[in-house]
Structure formats: structure tokens, C-alpha cells
Image (tube, rainbow, N blue to C red):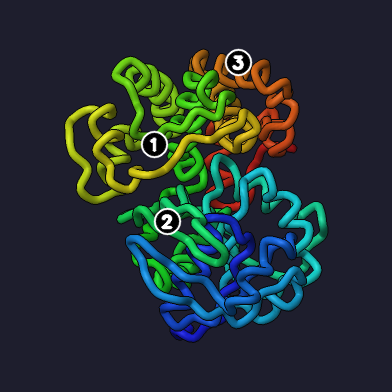
Amino acid sequence: MSLMMNVAVLGAGNGGQAMAGYLATQGFNVRLWDRSLERLEPIIIQGGITLTGKLSGFGALKTISTELLEVLQDAQVIMVVTTADAHEDIARRCVPFLQDGQVIVLNPGRTCGAMVFRQALSEARLSARVYVAEAQSLVYACRITGPAMVNVFGVKRLVPLAAMPAQDTPRVLESVQQMYSCFVGARDVIETGLENIGAIFHPAIALLNAVRVEAADSFLFYQTMTPKVSLFVEKLDQERVAVGKAFGLHLTTAKDWVLRSYENVQGDTLYARMRSNPAYDGIEAPTSLESRMFTEDVPTGLVPIAELADLAGVDAHLCRALVDLSSALCQRDFWAEGRTRKRLGIEGMQAQDLVNWVTTGTTSHVL
């Protein structure tokens, strides 16, 4: 592959526009898709996307369309940059147009995203041989600031990535590292899924600021962290790390993840690191309880983490309590909506069965 390879970016939200704009400035042939013509119209008018902040320049896009065929045909790499709750729908929409050898990366997969995507492709009877992977997090901290314009607050230095199954990871990295040197191989999608730090940060901080969120009070989401809230987040994070240990993983703590992922972070505590992170400066809190901090991060983050904890016999009472409280607050059943073991197709598996499955794509367990 060359720098002129064709890259499809699915999703024209904050992350999708930042990724499409950046890759276009680097010489890639970028095709951008979104189901909403209204969202695409300003980009069509401009012919591309303007980047500001940590990245700057204008990225002219080759194709901007609501038609998947136009975007996916002959694309060597497909970057899915939608909310995680759209992964199943996106997979089914793509099936008629996918071709042998295409690489699909979820940016990010949240928790168990690649499993969900693979299962949806299988249920839709995909015949093409494609490679499916997930990134642990989005490369950028960014926000749309105007028509066809994105401000990039920060760029992550290191983003773990794994394919489903893991034996395909080297093939995926061969393609995506031409676009982003920050991508590094993880053991498997259990690791990338459990390294979903957004599931730890977003619902907890939003829930503990629910009055301010519902009142649409203006405050910086990450940098208004308080000492006691940061300690609570670390207690929640200990459950995630314990689940990883049960699967033979030594996960990065949330405190160390902030330091590893971003430049110019100061301090020895999570509280200090969140408040000093320049990439978080200017990122406002949501102004509604219908925010993705709940509607995405709970069902596709906390629910599967709690389910993996149960599968591995690990106590995750804080994680489960956050799902229950978020469900009650938002008047939705996130357990019913979420990525449960049954929905993932892993009900009845033991921990080693799951490891075998995500490594090779096969298991001795009878599903």
C-alpha cells in the first residue's frame, strides 16, 4: 500500500471529521460517509474539512456521500468512527459492499465492539474475507467548532489496537500504521475492550454531576474533577483492572493511562493529571442526560465490563451499581440495551474459552 491508498471514514461526527481531515492533509484518498445529508452538506460545500488546534490545514476529500457503495468500493482501510451503539447497524449496512482483503477498524470499539461487529457480519452472511479490529480509544480529543471545521485539543501518543481474532492483528497494523504511528498491537480484544477508559471516566463523572448536567450548567467536563470524585473513579477503575487480571492481563490504571496517552500531563494523582491535561482544556460537559456519556458508555462500556467480571468471577459491584443508577436516572434499561454475554454470543463460556475464541476465532465451547 502507498500513501495514496483509499481510506473510507464512516461517521462525520467530531472524531470522524478530525480523522478524515487529517488523513486528507497527509495525501490519502479519503471518502467520508454519514447517514445524515444535513451533517455532510457543509463539508460538501467546502469540499473538505479545516483543522485547527494541535493539527492545522485543509483536507480536501475525494468523496463525501450518504451512499456506502461510493465510499466503500476499493477502499483498502475502513475507519468506523461512529458511536459504539451504532456498530451492529453499521456492520449490517456494509455487508453488501465489502470486498476481500479490506481492513475495518472501530475507532474506538469501546468494550467488545469487534466481537459485536464480527457477529453482525456473520449473521448478515458476509462472504468476503475482511479483517476487523478495534482501537482502544479515539486518536483525538476534538470538537466540531463550525461548518466543516474541527478543533483538535490533543493527539494521543499511544493507542493499542487488536483484531478479532488476534491472529489478524499484524495484518491490520501493517495497513493502519501507515496512517497513524501511534497504533500498537495489543494481546487481543479483551485487552483493548477492558482498556476502555471512557467507560470509567464518562458515566461516573457525568452521574456525580447529574444536577449540573441536567441544568445545562457550563463547566469543563474533565478538568472540573474534584479530589473525592477522582478517588471514586479510581475505586471503580480497580474493578476493571481486577477483571483484566482474571484474564491474564496487566492493564494500565486510569491514572497512568492519562500520563501515557497525552503530553505535558503533570502530577502524581489522577486528580492532578486530569486537571493538568492540556488536551482536556476547553472540553465542555454535556448539557443533557441524553448524552453519550450515558447512552453510549453505559451499554457499550460498563455493561460488558460487568459481564466479563461475572464470567471471570470478579466482584464488580460499583460497576453494576453505576449501570443501575444510570438506568434509573435516564429512565432506560441499559442492561437490556447493552452488550450482555447473551448478546455477544459468549453465554456459558469460561474465561479460557473466551481467550481462545478472541485469539484464533475458534473455541471448544459449544455456543
Choose top left, top right, bottom left or bottom right for residue 344.
top right
Of the numbered discs in the image, which one, if any, rests on residue 139? Answer: 2
Q: 202 left or right of 303?
A: left
Q: 268 left or right of 143?
A: left
| Amino acid of disc 3 | Leu
Which residue is tagged 1?
249
Of the numbered discs in the image, which one, if any, rests on residue 325? Answer: 3
| Amino acid of disc 1 | Leu
Q: Is residue 291 above or below residue 237?
A: below
| Amino acid of disc 2 | Val
* SS of the residue under disc 1: loop
* Residue ID at (37%, 19%): 229
Tell me the CA gap for discs 2 and 1: 23 Å
* Residue ID at (45%, 26%): 205
Measured from the top left, where is residue 343 in percent x and y?
73, 36
Of the two numbered discs 1 and 3 in the rendering, the one whose residue sits closer to the viewer: 3
Is residue 299 in view? Answer: no
